[in-house]
Amino acid sequence: MTHGSRAGMIFFLAAASIGLIFDGAGLGRMTLCAALLHEAGHIAVYVLCARRLPALRVRAGGFALRGTESLSKRKELAVLAAGPLVNFLFAAGCFGFARRHASYFMYFFAAVHLCVGLYNCLPFGALDGSRILSALVPVRLNGALCWFRRTVGILILGFVLSAWVHGVLTPTAAAALVLAFAYLLAQGLFAGADLW
């Protein structure tokens, strides 16, 4: 393990521990559970395609999986789509359960899964949506893809700031969304060659 990955692991574990200690509503635990199921989806489809486990890497933003086998474009897309698909399936299952049993916890857990799946579908940084777009768009259109990502990012940030100014979002919610985009920017800068 390199010095950088060791420092990244320590930073991630410290941040996660602090977050879980002060997680009175359980949102952090639900998000961690949804993220683990998301990664399990990637791993399961990768194992089906490559017949081996991917390598695990720890960095400041969390855990990253790297495929050790070269996959066809179709298999790579299946691996990339598996994580968000697991979140969407769990969201649907939790929502169905909550409707039958009137469980606020399951409604909330469904919302967490939906948010984790949608967040990972964004076309930025090292997220699945960005990698799916990169795999689908021909190399000659990379300039247009960069323009699209920049434009969507500016539009979303403009929407967040406008919603905050007009009182639709609380300052805390607006700050959380801005921090989420700062995290995406950091992931994009330090992502390296990780597959997911």
Image (cartoon, rainbow, N blue to C red):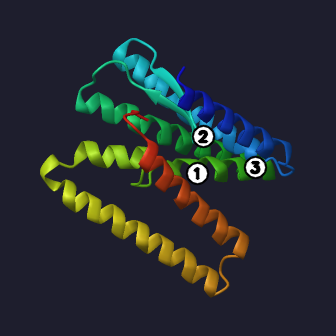
Q: Who's the residue at 23% across and 27% down the image?
A: 72
Helix, strand or loop at mark 3: helix
Question: Left or right: 48 with respect to 12?
Answer: left
Q: Who's the residue at 32% across and 31% down the image?
A: 76
Q: Quadrant of the C terminus?
A: top left
Whether pointer 3 and pointer 1 mark residues with C-beta atoms closer than 8 Å, the reply is no
Disc 3 to disc 1, C-alpha distance:
13 Å
Q: Earlier in the sequence, mark 1 or mark 2?
A: 2
Mark 3 or 1: in front is 3
Disc 3 crowd rating (10 Å Cα; few below 14, some 14-19, many 20+) is some
Disc 3 to disc 2, C-alpha distance:
16 Å
Disc 1 marks which residue? Answer: 114
Disc 1 to disc 2, C-alpha distance:
8 Å
Q: Amino acid at mark 1?
A: Leu
Q: Earlier in the sequence, mark 3 or mark 2?
A: 3
Mark 1 or 2: in front is 1
Helix, strand or loop at mark 2: helix
Disc 2 crowd rating (10 Å Cα; few below 14, some 14-19, many 20+) is many
Q: Who's the residue at 58% across and 66% down the image?
A: 178
Q: Residue furthest front?
A: 3
Task: Give whichever of 99, 180 is nearer the camera.
Answer: 180
Disc 2 marks which residue? Answer: 90
Disc 3 marks which residue? Answer: 27
Residue 80 point in image, percent of width and height: 39, 36
Q: Say above or below: 132 vs 42.
A: below
Q: Earlier in the sequence, mark 3 or mark 1?
A: 3
Mark 3 or 2: in front is 3
- The picture quadrant where one finds residue 154 is bottom left
